[in-house]
Amino acid sequence: MLLQIENLSVHYGAIHALKGISLEVAAGEIVTLIGPNGAGKTTLLRTISGVLRGSSGQILYDGFPMEMMPPHRIVAQGIAQVPEGRLIFQNLTVLENLELGAYSRRDRHGLKVEQEWIFHLFPRLQERLSQQAGTLSGGEQQMLAIGRALMAKPRLLLLDEPSLGLAPALVQQIFKALVEINRQGTTLLLVEQDAYLALETSQRGYVMETGEIKLSGKSAELLSNPQVKKAYLGQ
Amino acid sequence: MTEFLQQIINGLAWGAIYGLIALGYTMVYGVLRLINFAHGDIYMVGAMVGYYVARWIPQGTGLASFLSSLLAAMIVCGLLGALIERLAYKPLRHAPRINALITAIGVSLFLEYAGQLLFGADPKFFPNLIADKVFLQWHGIVINQIQVLIFSVTIVLMVLIHTIVQKTRLGKAMRAVSFSHTASQLVGINLNAVITFTFVLGSSLAGAAGILVSLSNPKIEPMMGIMPGLKAFVAAVLGGIGSIPGALVGGLLMGLSETFVVGYISSTYRDALAFLLLIVILLVRPSGLFGRSTAEKV
């Protein structure tokens, strides 16, 4: 298993945000995590990245415990994240954003390769390299957020709501890119509101509600699960 | 007219020093959203360090001893800044912002009274490292050697800071941290290292300012940082707190207006002016001159 989470709990003060989550991601997979607002999906991703700390449980990456590692070292280990709301550095240029994405890397010469790959995925970023990132459109900002995360050359890419606030055509484009990223060997853990799209794109899925995993299984099975259909697919 | 131009030169020299101190306020605010009220006292420590170093140097005066005391003050203040951050502010990183602000006032008082204990409460006289000789005279306008030194050191340091912040890896990380701590951590930036670096940078500038002021105002004592510290803070707010060019421009404007008040009205109102300015800025343009949301914030 590339990522193995066992019985993870996270508290915000008195609030029990994650109540003993267990979840697995194998190398090469696309795994999705769906669930309503406030279920704890963002909390889970931020805890994997080390920005939040769990109160108990284990996060194993390639078999090594990661719970105590500071965020910058987790990135260096190969786990990058496209955060909720993109959080691109609006006060910096597109190029500087990409450069910062590679902050944890020591192999300077490899960066060009990643950049070319990102421009291949999102040609629009290349046109806007010297522009302030804050002036990009929502879709371009999402592309930049994904590009920035790819600059770290991650083995595991965590994505928090990449479709949020984007027009359907752009969402299609972003998801096509995600599939291509996965084909090139990057494992994806995808948190998504658009349950249908997420389950269509992934091999396996987890359904999370109020800090707990309620359901899990192959995405195709979840798509036809009556509970999922009713709660998340509007059928 | 001659007098007017002379006032401008004197004002710019003062303003350059305010600008150096204001940079430290603005950079620390950029990465931590904290007004480091101890910053003025670091400037005092800079002057004290310079005083002791200059006395140890056998030749006593001249450019070489000036540069060595400058360097010593910058290094000691840089380390002191890092130490203060580590001991006083880091434990409060996730506490409400007001806690850190009150702590900053505490650190400020601590430095002032520790200074009295360590250096004594009586004023000391900074050695006359650079002779107060005329460097340039033109139609009655005088620029003296100390002013030339103030301008040159300030310009060198400003260019250095600009290059660090705009071009280097760590500088880009500083700008990223000033935008969002979470996003910075998620791209692999070591948040603690960047914050420490910011304190080192800002505090070493305050140390340099301490030496530059002591050249022309040699009377130094442990409370000397209070007023310039507050005025530099006002300068940073005037320029737009968080903005690096704003700190410089704010400092220069502060220096100029102070000199004009002293020159044309009365030196009694010198200190009142800073706070009058603060009130006016807060009423008219709270974000300061360069404080638009799109402005570069560090």
Image: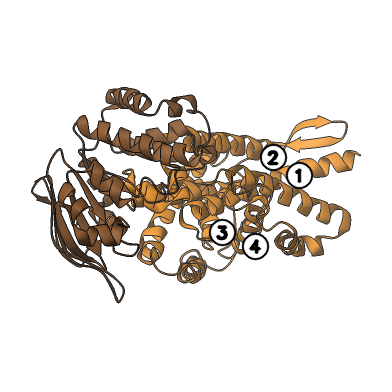
Q: Is disc 3 placed on a helix, strand or loop?
A: helix
The percent coordinates of residue A2 (x first, y second) are: 12, 44
- Color theme of the render: by chain
> Marks 4/3: CA distance?
8 Å
Depth-wise, is mark 3 or mark 2 nearer the camera? 3
Q: Is disc 4 placed on a helix, strand or loop?
A: helix
Depth-wise, is mark 1 or mark 3 nearer the camera? 3
Q: Is disc 1 placed on a helix, strand or loop?
A: helix
> Marks 3/2: CA distance?
21 Å
Color of chain B here?
A: orange
> Marks 4/2: CA distance?
21 Å
> Marks 4/1: CA distance?
19 Å
Counting residues from the start of the chain, the first of labels 2 and 1 encountered is 1
- Amino acid type at circle 2 is Gln
- Amino acid type at circle 1 is Asn
Front one among B75 and A152: A152
> Marks 1/3: CA distance?
21 Å
Q: What subunit carries mark 3?
A: B
Please give the label number shown on residue B10: 1
Discs 4, 3 touching: Cβ within 8 Å: yes
Q: What subunit carries mark 4?
A: B
Chain letter for brown?
A
Residue B271 shown left or right of residue B90 in the figure: right
- Amino acid type at circle 4 is Met
Counting residues from the start of the chain, the first of labels 4 and 2 encountered is 2
Front one among B155 and A178: A178
